[in-house]
Image (tube, helix red, strand yellow):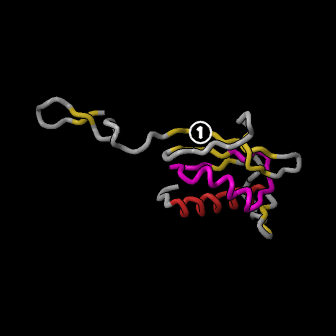
Amino acid sequence: MTTRTGNGRPRLVASAAGRGPAVDVRCRLRLKVDRYGCIQPRSIDSRSGLMNIYGTGAVVEVDLGRGSCLTYYDADLIAENLAKCAAIHIVSTEAYGERPRIERGTAYNADGAVVVLRWAIERAARRRGATAC
């Protein structure tokens, strides 16, 4: 990307010269769900089952699949790996807009799991000082 300065030759814009923001990386994180519908802080796509730690500027789509149960503790573990991301999209195949059921630190339906994970990501981003997440 270049910009014109008068009649001279074009010069590089700051972002093209390496002084700009981090490059956006688009990733997908599919979380493991057990046979009871409990969402675990593990990745389906990783050989070891562990989640990646996403860097600054990453755009991550978190897929909860058919999960319908998520504890605050597990949501915090997931959120710690996503705290530096520029944007996070939470996707669920079970959530369809019903009222979230959250009791004593656990979400008991898919819409509640989405809400609990969103809260955890917001808390983790605040602790790390991220401005946009």
- Please identify the residue farthest to the bottom as the structure is shown: 104
Query: Residue at point 77% right, 57% down?
Result: 70
Query: Which quadrant of the view contains residue 46?
Result: top right
In the rendered image, which quarter contains the N terminus? top left
Query: Residue at point 71% right, 42% down?
Result: 50
Residue 67 location (% of width, % of height): 79, 50
Query: Residue at point 20% right, 31% down?
Result: 10
Residue 25 location (% of width, % of height): 52, 38
Where is 10 relative to 92, above or below?
above
Residue 132 location (% of width, % of height): 49, 56
Q: Count the marks: how many?
A: 1
Where is 53 relative to 128, above or below?
above
- Please identify the residue farthest to the front as the structure is shown: 48
The residue at which mark 1 appears reads as 27
66 to the left or right of 58: right
Foreground residue among 13 and 48: 48
Query: Which quadrant of the view contains residue 63?
Result: top right
Query: Residue at point 35% right, 43% down?
Result: 20
Q: Amino acid at mark 1?
A: Cys
Query: Which quadrant of the view contains residue 5?
Result: top left
59 to the left or right of 1: right
- Please identify the residue farthest to the top as the structure is shown: 9
Q: Secondary structure at mark 1?
A: strand
Taking the magenta stretch, the answer to whether it contains residue 65 is yes
Give neighbour class at mark 1: few <14, some 14-19, many 20+ (Cα, 10 Å). Answer: some
Foreground residue among 121 and 65: 121
Taking the magenta stretch, the answer to whether it contains residue 74 is yes
Residue interval drawn in magenta: 63-89
- Please identify the residue farthest to the left as the structure is shown: 7
